[in-house]
Image (cartoon, grey):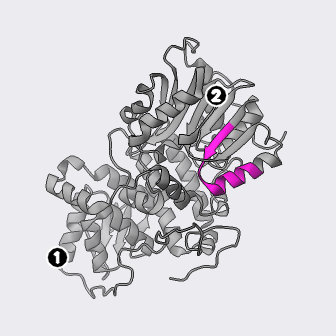
Amino acid sequence: MKMRQQPSSTPRYRREGAFSGDKRPRQHEHGPLRGRSLIPGKSSNFLDRLTATKLLQIIGQPPVNIALWDGSKVPEGDEDVLATLLFHDRASLYLTLLRPELRWGDLFSEGRVEVKGDLPGLLDAVYRGIDQKTVRPSLKWLNQTLGHRRIRNTFSKAADNIHHHYDIGNDFYRLWLDQEALQYTCAYFPDPAMTLEQAQLAKMSHVCRKLQLKPGDQVVEAGCGWGGFALFMAKNHGVSVKAYNISREQVSYANQKARGLGLADRVEYVLDDYRNIRGEHDVFVSIGMLEHVGPTYYPLLGEVIDNCLKPGGRGLIHSIGRNTPKPMNAWIERRIFPGAYPPTLREMMDIFETSRFSVLDVENLRLHYALTLDAWLQRFESHANEVEEMMDEQFVRSWRLYLAGSKAAFTSGRLQLFQVLFSREEDNDIPWSRAYQYNTPEQHHDEIGPG
């Protein structure tokens, strides 16, 4: 594979010594058959076509056909087809059938499998077509056993997991996230016609209203990304923020931005794990961090919040979730988001019940995340050539699949987006209705920059 020269200011996994003592495989050299000689069949046979037919049955007979390496299709014809799934060699077909979640993503990334047509639409149709109840227990057990080992978020491992995804260079993320605050979480679209920038500002305003921020509040944020929300809260609501993050790239960027905006006296970014949050605060907020915690540590997170929140304090957790418990897609967790786990609301209650917090409000923004991902995917595709120059072709295919698959997971209902508002159980100073969340005019003039 041709490797591009990396900009010296941008750390990459494949740069020597990027992380001290790091022995992990390079992100773009993870192909399951790398180093083996591939000898595609010159023509497909009856067993190949039978296997393709079986694969379509397993995924629920979506409006998709499979094209094999010799040009034959199952079923034949292109009438009413959403997309065509093209296998370039025999091994890729059988590996997909054996370990679909992990292998298919690798094969797609390597270019041995292609999708001709609507990639998000194909994945949405597959997700809708797969009925887990029809899978025989023996096959389900086999797939789980051969799938992958869960990556945990222990205190020592969490930083590595975050570095794997977030410390691949700010220049990469700037290409396709919103330009105002670099928000890498679900936006909020009161009007679906909004731009991504408008929707991310609307999301931050929405969360601030839910938390009823007022000047002088002391806010602690767990997992702050590139720091945009902390700056937004400080500038537009007169609060002081202490934000924790274990991504070196993000904390460095956020501190520089805070100094440039003259907000360093009110916003402090701490390069540390959420488990080390200290002090007393009026508000706890976490946007898109819970996915990196893992259910094992939810009671501990509840203790951390309990210890840092003042009497009468309030909090909000915004997280990707599920309706029923299930691990993260094996390929995404292994290749893109190590240690990620989207919880159910029942699992999230382990945060609140153990520390006797009262849940005041739950909002599901699932379709808002689908719109967010659609905007990200469009921007990513418009900069695909630049991304390839930064990284390589395989990286482009991997992230194309990741963004398209994530969009499909939300449109199909496989993933949810929960915002959970909570307070201490004895607090009676709480709103009587939700009017305060929605009756305040949208502050679309709010911004991160000076003004």
Q: How many marks?
A: 2
Q: Residue at x 61, y 35 (%)?
A: 278
Looking at the image, residue 366 lies above or below residue 42: above
Tell whether 147 sits left or right of 425: left
Whichever of labels 1 and 2 marks the residue nearer the N terminus, that label is 1
Rendered image quadrant of residue 101 = bottom left
Mark 2 neighbour class, 10 Å CA radius: few under 14, some 14 to 19, many 20 or more:
many
Instruction: Tell me the mark number nearer the camera, choosing from 1 and 2.
Output: 2
Q: Quadrant of the C terminus?
A: top right
Mark 2: which secondary structure?
strand
In depth, the one of 243 and 415 nearer the eye is 243
Name which residue type carries label 1: Leu
Which x, y percent locates residue 93? 28, 73
Can residue 306 be seen in this snapshot?
Answer: yes
Q: Residue at x 62, y 20 (%)?
A: 436
- The reply to whether the magenta stretch includes residue 255 is yes
In depth, the one of 62 and 400 nearer the eye is 400
Residues rendered magenta in the picture? 242-256
Which x, y percent locates residue 181? 69, 47
Looking at the image, residue 433 lies above or below residue 248: above
Q: CA distance from mark 1 to mark 2?
A: 65 Å
Q: Residue at x 44, y 32 (%)?
A: 351
Q: Which residue is mark 1?
A: 47
Question: Label for residue 281?
Answer: 2
Name the chief secondary structure element in magenta. helix
